[in-house]
Amino acid sequence: MAEVIGKRLREIRRARGKSLTVIAGLAGISASYLSRLESGERALDRRSLVVDLANALEVAPSELTDVPLAVPRERSDDHALAQVRLALLATSLGEPRGEAQSFEQLRARVRHVLGALNGADNTQAGAALPGLIRDLHTTANTRHDEPGVLRLLALTHMQGTQAWLVTIGAPMDLSWQAATLARQAAEQLDEPVSLGVSAYGTALGLLSAGAFDLAAQTLSDVELPLVTTEEVQLAGSLALASSLVSAAQKDQAERAAALDHAAELAERTGETNLLGFGFGPSNVAVWRMQCALEAGDHAEAAAIAESVDPEALTVRARQAVYWREYGRALARLPKQRDTAVMVLRRAEQISPEHVHRHPFTCSTLSELVARAKRDAVGRELRGMAYRAGLHV
């Protein structure tokens, strides 16, 4: 993938009639580093760098990263994605054509989907989502148990639909549609927790699109009481989202403040998993790793990883993220290639989608493959890259 994105970078730069020196200067990097990005020797693995280069080239960030990939999907993924797309389309027209069910039935189904996602069983979640989306909206249209159903809608579309779509690498417009439905349900309900849940999803969607200022504003607009454990862990999760946005904005002071605030709240809650956030001290540490990677500090990310017990994470999918981000960090450190490959392999074993469909990780794999040796670790690496749809 690094080669594909690098080729796109070079094509756009040449189409603009700009030299390496000019574009590198506008993006705040060296011409030699930009040359390595264009050749695929270095991965384009930070949102802030994607945005800086897009601004320098005067294109949308999606022009650089939304490159069609020959990713081998399972048939179940293709089928589920098609069905989720149809369910979202029908819902947007006000014709969900599902079955009205009791609040208790729907709540149990929502818990099932969130449990599958938390457990990194994306196939099971994908199979259950289309019918759940249709039935939730059909029930909402009857206005029976309206507050409860609206709470389920906001939670499902953020922690269920949006999270699943992002994990399997679906087009950004679909995950944004899910975030929009979550926000609409939360605004109709007008309760702090649901508004906070929807703001979390909206902010991460804006972050992925490169709209950092809007993401920061969305998070700062949330007003949440800190009375219940649910409210405290949600506030902590929002602070974590804010830390990553700040890292993308290169605001290190705000990044540190948000992480420290989240850590303070995590000390109050301990390791929890209310609303599917998996909030707690261990997850705060994983977000510290992600922020360090976003800031380009791979040594810091690796050092943080060494202090974390991934088994303490209450959500298995976050364990996959831990190993993935640890591997990305190690891949940039001297004499850590073999360890990086095995760590990434561990993430793949927990959740293939978290590796195969994550663009920054695919770039890292591509960079590693370009330097791979003909040894056992190299074979492990090339197998992982092949499963991620990369040319090896």
Image (spheres, rainbow, N blue to C red):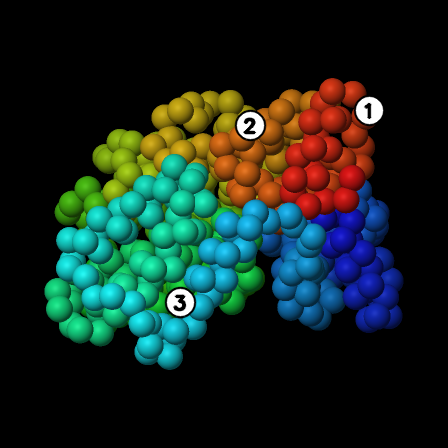
Q: CA distance from mark 2 to mark 1?
A: 21 Å
In the rendered structure, the answer to whether residue 52 lies left or right of residue 301 reads right
Residue plotted at (15% across, 53% down): 104
Please name the amino acid that badge 1 sits on: Arg
**Is 59 in front, or is 265?**
59
In the rendered structure, the answer to whether residue 319 lies left or right of residue 228 reads right
Query: In what quadrant of the picture does the C terminus appear?
Result: top right
Would you say the residues marked 2 and 1 are in contact, meaning their CB atoms lie under 8 Å apart? Answer: no
180 over 197 or under it: above or below? below
Please name the amino acid that badge 3 sits on: Ala
Residue corresponding to mark 1: 374
Where residue 155 sits, quadrant-wise, is: bottom left
Q: CA distance from mark 3 to mark 1?
A: 47 Å
Q: Residues within 10 Å of mark 1 (few under 14, many from 20)?
A: few
Q: Position of residue 298 (x, y in %)?
A: 62, 34
Please name the amino acid that badge 2 sits on: Arg
Q: Position of residue 316 (x, y in %)?
A: 40, 34
Q: Position of residue 371 (x, y in %)?
A: 80, 32
Residue plotted at (37% across, 31% down): 313
366 over 48 or under it: above or below? above
**Is 321 in front, or is 161?**
161
Would you say the residues marked 3 and 1 are in contact, meaning their CB atoms lie under 8 Å apart? Answer: no
Secondary element at tag 2: helix
Residue corresponding to mark 2: 346
Q: Residues within 10 Å of mark 2 (few under 14, many from 20)?
A: some
Residue corresponding to mark 3: 87
Outermost left residue: 145
Q: CA distance from mark 2 to mark 3?
A: 34 Å
In the rendered structure, the answer to whether residue 195 lies left or right of residue 201 reads left
Residue plotted at (34% across, 32% down): 314
Of callouts 2 and 3, the N-terminal one: 3
Q: How many marks?
A: 3
